[in-house]
Amino acid sequence: MSRTIGRLLIQVLGTLGGLLGLMLLVLGWSLFGESGSPTDGDSEMQSFLVALFLLVDVLMVGIGVFLIHNAGLLWFRFSPRAVRRFGGLAVLVLCGSLADTLHDHLGPDGPPWAPLAGLGTVVLAFVVYDMISKRLVRWFFSAPGTPPEASPHGAGPESPAETL
């Protein structure tokens, strides 16, 4: 696959993530008005549930803004940072699907090692993210005649310019 097709594929998938972020943003914003506020006669449990509902609303809006921002980075500032963020989101989706499949397969009353399978999914996510993001950054940002292993963008810490 050529770099141009790969870049377009990542941009299209990032756009789908941005549309999901837009949906989360609109849904979270519309739920702010629905959450209401506890009145004087409400119990403590109702107050707790309203606070929890507001927290979920804020998280939905925050995740939506992040996904929209990442889609914008992929289209307008295609950089190693944007590619690493895309890799992280892709790994989260894949490992979330794996964890959901494990949960469905093992069931709520699964074997005693079932929590270790969930922990293994988290460890797998970190390892796969590291591999995927380094490979994608090397592939997209190495010089055309240079082998990907010799690229300065794939290994080591971020440059100070990328962290700003």
Image (tube, helix red, strand yellow):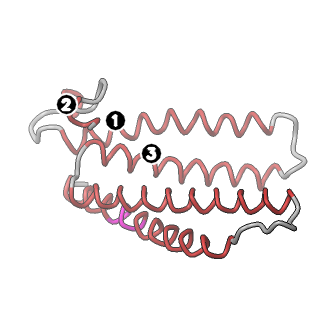
How many marks on residues? 3
Query: In the image, which disc is placed on residue 116?
Result: none
Please tell me whether mark 2 sits on a helix, a strand or a loop.
Answer: loop
Indicate the position of residue 80 as horizontal and vertical percent values. Answer: 26, 42
Which residue was labeled with disc 3? 88
At label 2, the amino acid type is Ser
Q: Is residue 81 above or below residue 158?
A: below
Helix, strand or loop for the magenta stretch, by majority:
helix
Q: Earlier in the sequence, mark 1 or mark 3?
A: 3
Residue at the (64%, 56%) spot, across then down: 55
Q: Is residue 14 magenta?
A: yes
Query: In the image, which disc is placed on residue 151?
Result: 2
Residue count near mark 1 (Cα–Cα under 10 Å), binned few <14, some 14–19, many ≥20 = some
Mark 1 or mark 3, which is nearer to you? 3
Residue at the (32%, 47%) spot, across then down: 83
At label 1, the amino acid type is Lys
* Residue that lies at the very extreme toward the front in this rendered image: 40
Residue at the (80%, 39%) spot, across then down: 114
Query: In the image, which disc is placed on residue 134?
Result: 1
Please tell me whether mark 1 sits on a helix, a strand or a loop.
Answer: helix
At label 3, the amino acid type is Gly
